[in-house]
């Protein structure tokens, strides 16, 4: 039976392990753009793109798109493909991203494990919809900073509910206190533009800061 957009989202929120994510997105990939993003008015990619363009400079490249999924963030950024690489755990989502021809390189990666095998000279790190229920938490953000060179820009969305429940504020403050990142700035935006579903009022925080020294 075909799932509604809200059911697709609730299923994603209920994921607990990396294997759960791989299995779930194997089927979700075919419906992600139209059955979820279009149907629910998924606003986060465009909202992040606006903030990123306001803050970024010519030195903030190349870009690592964390949890790139089908490539909606790269599509919203509208940048040359040689400037952005995509990372995701789902082969099926990566294949959808590959079809859009938006990325220089696509990496199949478990973002909760060591990232020493991947490039570590990115000028910016973006992420849309990956720091949320059932996905990445604040400790994973600390791990991802190893991909950035000093002064690299971070611009990511974190669902407001996840931000509060997982203690992102305290974690970010600790990183700032020890001089690893600049003081984080937060923009709060609606995740969705359509009001025909149960999550219409959900909010996301767009976090931005810069890496201050090698971790």
Image (cartoon, rainbow, N blue to C red):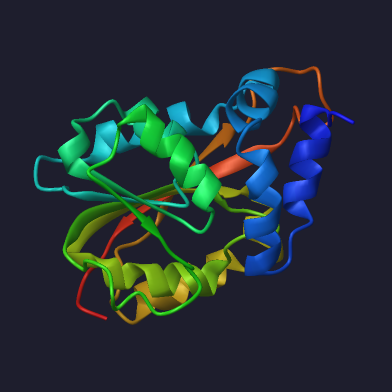
From the top left corner, tell me how far across and down residue 45 is, in percent.
Answer: 47, 32
Counting the numbered discs, the total is 0
Left or right: residue 172 compared with residue 19:
left
Kindly identify the residue that appears in the image at 51 percent across and 73 percent down: 112
Left or right: residue 70 compared with residue 79:
right
Where's the C terminus, which quadrant?
Answer: bottom left
Kindly identify the residue that appears in the image at 27 percent across and 67 percent down: 147
Q: What is the quadrant of residue 209 in the picture? A: bottom left
Residue lying farthest to the right in this orientation: 1
Task: Judge whether 106 appears above or below 172 on screen.
Answer: above
Task: Judge whether 41 appears above or below 86 on screen.
Answer: above
Where's the N terminus, which quadrant?
Answer: top right
Left or right: residue 54 compared with residue 60:
right
Q: Nearer the viewer, residue 204 or 177?
A: 204
From the top left corner, tell me how far across and down residue 145 is, in percent.
Answer: 33, 69
From the top left corner, tell me how far across and down residue 210 is, in percent.
Answer: 27, 59
Q: Nearer the viewer, residue 61 or 212?
A: 61
Q: What is the quadrant of residue 165 in the picture? A: bottom right
Kindly identify the residue that appears in the image at 65 percent across and 58 percent down: 21
Left or right: residue 61 compared with residue 53:
left
Is residue 184 in sight in this rendering?
Answer: yes
Q: Nearer the viewer, residue 96 or 143?
A: 96
From the top left corner, tell me how far across and down residue 139 is, in percent.
Answer: 52, 75
Is residue 166 in sight in this rendering?
Answer: no
Kindly identify the residue that appears in the image at 62 percent across and 33 percent down: 30
Q: What is the quadrant of residue 52 in the picture? A: top left
Task: Judge whether 144 appears above or below 104 on screen.
Answer: below
């Amino acid at each position: 039976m075909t799932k509604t957009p809200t059911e697709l989202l609730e299923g994603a929120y209920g994921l607990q392990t990396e294997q759960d994510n791989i299995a779930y997105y194997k089927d979700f990939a075919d419906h992600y753009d139209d059955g979820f993003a279009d149907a629910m008015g998924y606003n986060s990619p465009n909202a992040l793109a606006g903030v990123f363009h306001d803050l970024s400079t010519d030195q903030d490249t190349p870009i690592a798109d964390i949890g790139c999924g089908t490539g909606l963030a790269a599509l919203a950024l509208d940048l040359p493909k040689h400037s952005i690489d995509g990372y995701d755990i789902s082969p099926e989502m990566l294949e959808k991203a590959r079809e859009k021809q938006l990325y220089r390189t696509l990496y199949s990666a478990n973002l909760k494990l060591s990232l020493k095998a991947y490039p570590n000279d990115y000028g910016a790190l973006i992420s849309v919809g990956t720091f949320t229920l059932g996905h990445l938490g604040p400790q994973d953000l600390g791990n991802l900073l190893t991909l950035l060179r000093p002064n690299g820009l971070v611009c990511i969305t974190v669902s407001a509910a996840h931000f509060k429940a997982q203690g992102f504020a305290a974690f970010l403050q600790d990183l700032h206190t020890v001089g690893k990142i600049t003081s984080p700035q937060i923009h709060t935006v609606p995740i969705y533009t359509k009001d025909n579903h149960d999550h219409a009022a959900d909010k996301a925080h767009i976090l931005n800061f810069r890496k201050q020294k090698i971790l």
